[in-house]
Image (cartoon, rainbow, N blue to C red):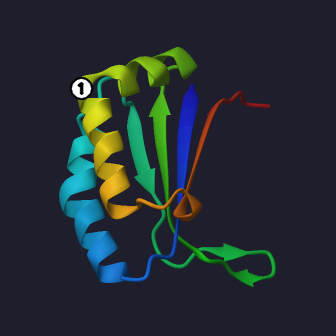
Amino acid sequence: MARMVVIYRTPENVEAFDRHYFDIHVPLAKAIPGLRKYEISDGPIATPVGLSDVHRIATLYFDDLAAIEKAFASPEGQAAGVDRRLFAPDESGVQIHLFDNREL
């Protein structure tokens, strides 16, 4: 299974970010073809040395990396990408990581 991990730094307006994220972005993302599972962080995000500047982490699950590529080439994937730029327009405020994983 492959994953897409999206890390959002704490925005200036947390309420506005969360309202847009949950009311608009999540429904768009959940419509992306091939999405198997969608998880988000809940509560404060910490590091081994204390709180971090990260507000939210989303993990999206797909069958493989090719499925992620196909999903985000779809109209639904494109719409979710455009929407992400509305509530997190500054690339310094978001990190996106794609990877396959295996159990050990």
Q: Residue 12's image quarter?
A: bottom left
- 46 vs 8: above or below: below
18 displayed left or right of 51: left
Label 1 crowding class (10 Å Cα cut-off): few <14, some 14-19, many 20+?
few
Quarter in which the N terminus is drawn: top right
- Mark 1 lies on residue: 75
Q: Residue 78's image quarter?
A: top left
Residue 96 lies, in percent from the top left, at 56, 46
Q: Residue 33's image quarter?
A: top left
Residue 6 lies, in percent from the top left, at 52, 51
Q: Residue at x 53, y 56 (%)?
A: 91
Q: Residue at x 27, y 53 (%)?
A: 25
Q: How many marks?
A: 1
Query: 81 or 51: which is nearer to us?
Result: 81
Question: What amino acid is at disc 1?
Answer: Pro
- Residue extending furthest toward the front: 90
- 45 vs 104: above or below: below
Residue 62 lies, in percent from the top left, at 47, 27
Query: 58 or 93: which is nearer to us?
Result: 93
Residue 11 lies, in percent from the top left, at 45, 76
- 56 vs 99: above or below: below
67 displayed left or right of 82: right
SS of the residue at dot 1? helix
Quarter in which the C terminus is drawn: top right
Q: Residue at x 24, y 31 (%)?
A: 76
- 48 vs 62: above or below: below
Q: Residue at x 23, y 26 (%)?
A: 75
84 displayed left or right of 10: left
42 displayed left or right of 100: left
